Image (cartoon, rainbow, N blue to C red):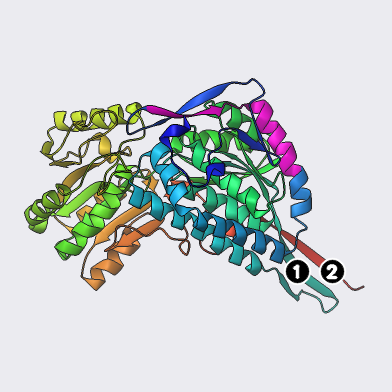
Amino acid sequence: MTKNIELQNKSLFQTQGFINGEWVDAQSKKTFIVTNPANDVPIAEVANMGAQETNQAIEAAEIAFQQWKLSPIKERYSLLMKWYQLIMDNQKDLATLMVVEQGKPYAEAAGEVIYAATFVQWFAEQGKRMNGVVKSAFSPNAELKYTKEPVGVVGIVTPWNFPLTMITRKVAPAIAAGCSVVVKPSELTPLSAFALAELAQQAGMPKGLINIIPTDDAASVGNALTASATVRKISFTGSTRVGKILMKQSADTVKRTSMELGGNAPFIVFDSADINTTIEALMASKFRNAGQTCVCANRILVQSKIYDEFVDSFIKKTQQLKVGNGLEEGVTIGPLINKQALEKVDTFVQNTLSKGAECLLGGKPHELGFTFFQPTILSNVPQDSPYNCEEIFGPVAPLIKFDTEEQGIAIANDTVHGLAAYFCSQDYRQINRVNQALRSGMIGINTGIFSNEFGPFGGVKESGIGREGSELGIEEYLDIKYSLLSFQ
């Protein structure tokens, strides 16, 4: 099956699970198939693990943790920086691997490799900055202090849409903090996770520090991670539905949790916006990864005075997108992840049209077949459209017209989610008002992309708990110990 993936570094192509520093088969010898979403061609037969292997990985991670938590900060920094450099040295292979198993255009995949590496570099540095506090207490004969200590073994569950970044953004701060990890990557994109583990091993990471459990039975692995008293934290990125399940399961052992869950991002275009800047921002937000991101613009709200001008410009720009296999030159929109995703997007479009919306562009599966969908623009989308309560996860842009600033804000906030929001305006006072009024964990103003290692990524309401990236990201993997020393 490897004939479909041309890599310079052949060691990056792995198909087994990674437990205690060894590449191993499932004990049942079961496997599952990973396919290329662009052509439905099988590319790998991967070990299909379950609760038994997960518990073995947890045991190995606990042994590794007992040593790693005592490791000098400089040692953690050195190993993380070696891992970072190896990721950077293997950019082309990692990008190619990602395109073949996930589908995004090569240019996007190459950008994600660098983006993923920056988190390793960032948290290597942040590990040096974990500070406690020592201060005078309530008495001259006492000293109060608190220190920060690693939480322990961390269970990590990641999605398929950013198969490198979602791992490094969690694993790097955990390792820097002194924790060990057991990772369950998506069954749709395990090869990228394996490649990261292989590079971590080449960097010299101690055995058991990073473990990868591939499976097509997510529930069995998730149950094992949440049931284990040894696992002290769960970090999950995925749907709100699954996040709630993991939170409930984690309650029995009172684990710490970080949850980056579903979004329903509004993109508000005010009359004061610059059209050209706004279109560029919207294209970046809406069509990146074929619309398969949790922070994609899900509802495009356009104020009435500039609605017609905006729509004309948006259609012209969208028509320039090139749909195709991500390895082909000039492709800007790749396939959806699988046939179920295609069917979901198609059903959403048809349901919205049946409620009175108008299709201005696209609106159906692409002539290329397989899992390709046409870049689509819908207008006059009613408030009871499914897009107002569910993520699209496809290259579909529903347009909603509004009249006043207050109305636009009200529509934007009318959701149980609060992950990301965007708005465009050249009116500074309006920018201040709207920024304060929107209920969202992250807001892009006159931009369609705000994700980077410096910013705290996360949501409010039913979009999650905790933050990733920034100086706050490492705090998610640290416990606080308070001590009071009496001199009497």
Whether residues under marks 1 and 2 lie with C-beta atoms below 8 angstroms apart, the answer is yes
Q: Left of 139 or right of it: where is 4?
A: left
Q: Is 383 contained in the magenta span?
A: no
Examine the rendered structure and indicate whether residue 253 appears above or below residue 169.
above
The percent position of residue 132, horizontal first and vertical second, equals: 70, 68
Q: Earlier in the sequence, mark 1 or mark 2?
A: 1
Label 1 sits on residue:
145
Label 2 sits on residue:
485
Q: Left of 36 or right of it: where is 275?
A: left
Q: What is the number of the mark on residue 406?
A: none
Visible residue check, residue 204 = yes
Q: Left of 131 or right of it: where is 385?
A: left
The percent position of residue 213, horizontal first and vertical second, equals: 60, 34
Q: Residue furthest right?
A: 488
- Residue at 25%, 41% in the rendered image: 395
Quarter that holds the C terminus: bottom right
Q: Which amino acid does label 2 sit on?
A: Leu
Q: Is 46 contained in the magenta span?
A: yes
Examine the rendered structure and indicate whether residue 47 appears above or below residue 261.
above
Examine the rendered structure and indicate whether residue 338 appears above or below residue 102.
above
Q: Residue furthest bottom?
A: 140
SS state under label 1 = strand
Visible residue check, residue 236 = no
Q: Which of 229 and 52 is in front in this view?
A: 52
The percent position of residue 33, horizontal first and vertical second, equals: 48, 26
Q: Distance between the residues labelled 1 and 2?
A: 8 Å
Magenta stretch bounds: 41-62
Instruction: Using a 10 Å C-alpha cutoff, classify the residue at mark 2 as few (fewer than 14 neighbours), some (14 to 19) or many (20 or more).
Output: few
Q: Which of 430 and 52 is in front in this view?
A: 52
